[in-house]
Amino acid sequence: MNARAAIFAGFLTTVFLFAGIVLSHRHSPPTSSVSTLRPAVDLDQAAASEEPYALKQSHANRQLYLEALKHAKLMPKYSTRLGTFVSATVSPSADSQPQAGTWIPLGPGNVGGRTRGLVIDPRNANVMYAAAASGGVWKTTDAGASWVPLTDSMPSLIMGCLAIDPSNPDTLYAGTGELSVGALGVGIYKTTDGGTTWTLLSDIFQPAPNGPPQQFGFVDAIVVSPNNSQRVYVATGFGGEDGVCRSSDGGNTWTQVLPGRRGGSLSSQQGCHSLVIRTDQDTDYIVANCSDGSSSGIYLNTGAEGSGTWSPVLEESSMGVVSLAIAPSNQNVMYALASGSFADQSLHAFFMSTDGGHTWGAQVRAGGTASINTELLSDACANTRSQGFYDNVIAVDPTDPNRVWAGGINLFRSDDAGATWNLADDGIHVDHHTLLFHPKYDGKSNVTMFGGNDGGVFATQQARGTTAQCNTSPRIRWTPQNSNYSTTQFYSGSISADGTAYAGGTQDNGYLLGNDTDGFSGWRQIWGGDGGVVAFDPTDSKTMYLRNNRPAQLLKSTDAGRSFNVILSGQLAGPYNSPILIDPSNPNRVWVASWGDLPALSRSIDAGASWTEAARLGPLDYGPVGAVAIAPSNPNLMLASIGGTGRLHRCDTALTSTIDTLWPENIIDLHSAITSIAFDPQDSNIAYLTNGAYRTPETHSVYKSTDSGLTWQGLDGSGSSALPNIPLTTILPDSTRPGTIYVGSPIGVFVTLDGGDTWAKESMGIDNVEIGTLSLTLADNIPRLYAFTYGRGVWRVRPVDFASHIIAASVTGKRLTVTGENFDSSAVILVNGSPLPTSAGQGNPGTVLTSKKGGKKIPHGQGVILQARNGDGTYSDQFQFVRP
């Protein structure tokens, strides 16, 4: 069971509050139930991204992270789909992208993920680029009707910002690293051909002349000089090199021109965050914001291309992250949206300058009369939370300097230079990060505007429409532009018993369900809020369990997610991102991690109708229950981890365990979280676990036990075929191929074919995306491996050993019969590429396909190409057939 998010929640700043309900050792389920899905727009819980534990840990040490990337690039590459080792990219910083892998993307192609940057080609407004927070750079050539990824094979998919050269729009810069959540990047990507090829500037794999090996771990903003395309400015954060840097040669070399602030607390606010440049001056007239985590300042340089001075023009001790914007129609007018300090994050003030940034005055300031005006960075109309460090963006109407937009959790517009505000967010996802106007916007015939948020990319053709106060209408209407924009961030996922449906919990997009029938863009939300853990019944594809966040509840559906009942609530329901485990030997036995007075496990023997509190595992200060596993052939044998200290508990009487049963503790000296535990599918004496932190000389990345969890040994490999030293997220022993084990990490999937002696990088086609969950199903007796990723949706591969093959074909009357192997239950026959109505041969599942009238498509003596297309998206090899 993968439990990255659960452990992350226990060790970072999220605090889970549960009702103080006293429960007996056995209790009945609550009577309340939910019969219909609540709308996503109402259910989104508008919380900042809770980055998975291993992702956070991987970025805690920049040097080790970069070394892991370099090692992974030089490792052998293996393709599960092809069943062979494939060519690896020799140069870690190659300009061209390596050949794509053979995994099949499953989507969602209709639900976008967190988007940090948007730019439009000024020559052709149909061409737009988007920077997904952990999904790389994307491009549309049809104004958002469809998107294609551009950077899947680059060293990092973690994006902080995006900029386009206004003089040469085929040139773009993509800044990696997401400062607000501490997700480390690898530098700056540059393309000069509209995204076809990319160069990694300031190569992370070569030491810099006078400093550490990489200077741009968190790039929050980039601007290109309108006076000289070779001059580029970047705002970087959170490290020894944070500040504003300038390049005079298109990004080949850099000079720090404004050092970052020092003296405050280290936090995700430290560094320089915002950077804007005037386009009406002969000099590079730039305004920047920098923060030290406790205070913040705005800096002005009216001649940044030379020896111009960076002057502090606004500094306030309680001011945090600040976003900046210049009014295009009067560039003496500037605005600043300032959050409070890291401990606050609500609105500090909204400032305006009318003299080009030399002086500033507050239009709205916190502490005044409570109103929507003071909630620009809070959950508007509820004011229950604020997160100005995470979502904080402003933009000014291109034709009206007094009409300004502000995005925090909600989206607002002011028509009087920021003095008063209204909501402008009908139909748009919450948590706003970027706002952009159409290049031909004129305030009359063209009032089109775009936004990037935690739900992807949205557009409105009503940017001058009517705004509204809380709980009133109309508001400005937005529509999603997420077709094929597969950037959803999955924490975890589960596969249905028949292998045709897949569901997962996502960052700020709730629980999503996809299936083979509805396809890549047919996903639907089955529960809102922040997604956590979901589990399908392994014997019934319509039954699933998931967790609600606020309030803490365990939910069950018996109709494939169309409706849910509450089967457990309060303390025993536990955090929304903690484990749900269904006994593989009896689906009526369900285990859930709870978090009351102590970390605990609860057990149901009747599929959730009633519950027994079955284990208390340790003091509360150890953290919540993390990973849990049940031995497939011995349901009495369980392993469970707690918190981030490497504490592992073992029980061999789990079926009769009670709250008074002591689960012996076996401390593995990791000093970090155990992120996943798995038993060997065939041998309960063999178990594996993964380390959620960098290994040390005393620790390992993967551990193996041959005595059912009593003792453990490392399984990291050695030399160039060793696992990279990177925190791991999940582990999956392959039940169909002994010795084959997959592990997920923040930089992709790794596989061993020899039980851990040697490892290779799995060739997926998305080399360095974080993996949330790996799952294996055996529907139709065909294994399929699934990967739920944090930023690139869900992927699937069928091992080459189980590829479909056509062996023979015949026509009897009108009936066409195809004989072969490894056809799935949804396979169809293709004749010269055209599908025919097809049924599986009775009594011969997987080996015979028939089309009652398919013979009519094949005249006597004519040759055709036959192929089988499976429901999982794979194809058989081509078979040449000539009808006698």
Image: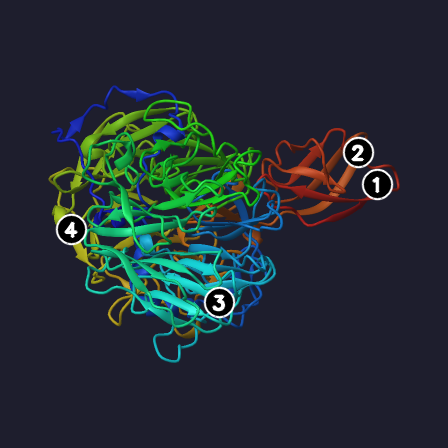
Instruction: Give the residue type that dot 4 points to.
Output: Tyr
Mark closest to the chain's N terminus, 1 or 3: 3
**Camera-nearest residue between 4 and 440:** 440
Q: Residues within 10 Å of mark 4 (few under 14, many from 20)?
A: some
Dot label at residue 883: 1
Circle nearer the viewer, 3 or 4: 3
Mark closest to the chain's N terminus, 1 or 4: 4
Element assignment for label 4: helix
Q: Position of residue 836 (x, y in %)?
A: 71, 33
Mark closest to the chain's N terminus, 3 or 2: 3
Dot label at residue 231: 3
Q: Which residue is mark 4?
A: 622
Q: Which residue is mark 2?
A: 855
Circle nearer the viewer, 1 or 4: 4
Q: Position of residue 86 (x, y in %)?
A: 57, 65
Marks 3 and 4, how far apart in space? 51 Å
Element assignment for label 1: loop
Marks 4 and 2, how far apart in space? 68 Å
Instruction: Give the residue type that dot 3 points to.
Output: Arg
Question: Are circles 1 and 2 on residues that touch, CB within 8 Å?
Answer: yes
Q: Quadrant of residue 27?
A: top left
The vertical placement of 319 against 143, above or below, is below
Circle nearer the viewer, 3 or 2: 3
Mark closest to the chain's N terminus, 3 or 4: 3
Q: Is residue 24 left or right of residue 846?
A: left
Q: Is residue 152 left or right of residue 412?
A: right
Element assignment for label 3: loop
